[in-house]
Image (spheres, helix red, strand yellow):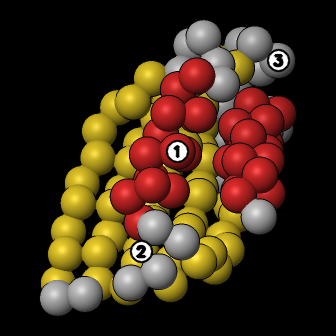
Amino acid sequence: MAKYECRLTGDFDRILSYLHDEILEGSASASYENGSDYAAGEVRCAVRVYERFSYAGSNRVSLNLTLMGRGDELFLSAITSGGSQAMFVKINTWGEEAFLEKVVELISELN
């Protein structure tokens, strides 16, 4: 499992849409699996789950994005999982790391 978290400043909907579109366009095998949206007063939370095939690991990996926001103050948590081919020990994390690296690149392009 790999994780990336950061604080952002910007428009919640624009950043969420940007990440969604770029993740799906970034890999021919990427798919949007499901999501959830919640708001309580000024606070918003969006959860998105994606999946893609990892050619390096010959398996599927998932990416969970959680974007929290109040006004233009945002917090993003991105966590990948899956990809290991072993039964008891996780020995293949290439696909997870590559999927997460895509999110890190996208965030750096926002700045």
Task: Determine the CA span between mark 1 and mark 2.
Answer: 15 Å
- Position in image of residue 16 (x %, y %): 45, 53
- Position in image of residue 15 (x %, y %): 51, 56
**Label 1 sits on what residue type?**
Tyr
Residue 61 appears in which quarter of the rendering?
top right
Task: Determine the CA span between mark 1 and mark 3.
Answer: 26 Å
The residue at 62%/75% (across/down) is 8
Q: Is residue 110 left or right of residue 94?
A: left
As helix, strand or loop, the secondary structure at mark 1 comes to helix
Residue holding disc 2: 68
**Label 3 sits on what residue type?**
Ala
Numbered circle sitting on residue 56: 3
Is residue 85 depicted above or below 99 in this figure?
above
The residue at 47%/40% (across/down) is 20
Residue 31 seen anywhere in this rendered image of the structure: yes
Nearest the viewer among 5 and 93 is 5
As helix, strand or loop, the secondary structure at mark 3 comes to loop
Rate crowding at label 1 as few (under 14), some (14 to 19) or many (20 or more) other CA atoms within 10 Å. Answer: some
